Image (cartoon, grey):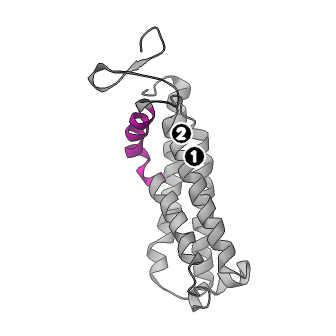
Amino acid sequence: MDAGGMSKARGGQALSNGYTGPGIWIRIQHRFGPRMMEWFMAGHMMLFGCILLLPAQTFNQPAWKSFRDIFHSEDLLGWIMFFVGILRIVGLVINGARKNVTPQIRQISAGIGCFIWAGITYGFYSSDVVSTWLAIYPLFAIGELVNIHRAAHDEGEIRNGTAAR
C-alpha cells in the first residue's frame, strides 16, 4: 500500500481500497475460494425456494407432510428460502468487496443456515419417509457448522492481526 491509500495489484496497478474500481472484483475473486461452501449453501437455499415457488405442488407428497403442517403453503417456505438465500449472497458480495471483512456477518448467516437445514432435516425426518433427503440435508447442516468455524477463525485472525489482506 502506498502513502495515498492505494494498494498494488497484478502488474503493479494501483487499486482503490473502497468499493469502486477493479479492486472490488479482485477482492471478491480472492475471497471466493475459501468461502466457496458459503456461496454454495446460499445458492442452494435460494434455488430450494425457487423450486417451491414453481406451480407444481410439492407439499402434497408424503415426505413433505410436516412442512404442510407447519407452513400450510409451500409459497411461504419458498419465499423464506429464496430471500434468505439472496440475503446471504448479498452479504457475501459486500463482505468480499470490503477491504476490512466482517466475519460476524458470515457467522450469523451460517448460523441461520444451520438452523434452517436442521429444520428441513427434522421436517423430512418427521414424515417417516426414508429418501435421499437423509444423504443431503443433514450434511448441509454440518456444512454450515464448518462455515461458522471458518468465519470464526477469520475473525480470530483479524483480531490477532494475522489475517492476510
Q: Quadrant of the N terminus?
A: top left
Q: Nearer the viewer, residue 151 or 165?
A: 165
Q: Main secondary structure of the magenta part?
A: helix
Range shown magenta:
24-38
Q: Secondary structure at mark 2?
A: helix
Name the spot of residue 94 as percent of width and height, x first.
55, 40
Left or right, 41 with reference to 104: left
User: What amino acid is labelled 1 in the image?
Assistant: Gly
Q: Quadrant of the C terminus?
A: top left
Residue at position x 57%, y 73% from top?
Answer: 121
Q: Is residue 71 left or right of residue 26?
A: right
Q: Is residue 115 a member of the stretch shown in magenta?
A: no
- Discs 1, 2 touching: Cβ within 8 Å: yes
Instruction: Indicate the position of residue 57 as horizontal and vertical percent values.
Output: 59, 87
Residue drawn at point x = 57 percent, y = 52 percent: 88
Q: Position of residue 66 (x, y in %)?
A: 66, 83
Q: Is residue 29 magenta?
A: yes
Give me the disc on residue 91.
1
Q: How many marks?
A: 2
Give me the disc on residue 95: 2
Toward the top, the furthest residue is 3
Compared to residue 126, the image places residue 151 above or below, namely: above
- Which residue is at 52% across, 58% downward? 42
Give the residue displayed 56% in from the left and 48% down from the top: 90
Q: Which mark is residue 104?
A: none
- Residue at mark 1 to residue at mark 2: CA–CA distance: 6 Å
Instruction: Kindly indicate the quadrant of the structure image that contains residue 58.
Output: bottom right
Please determine whether, in this image, residue 94 is positioned above or below residue 144. Answer: above
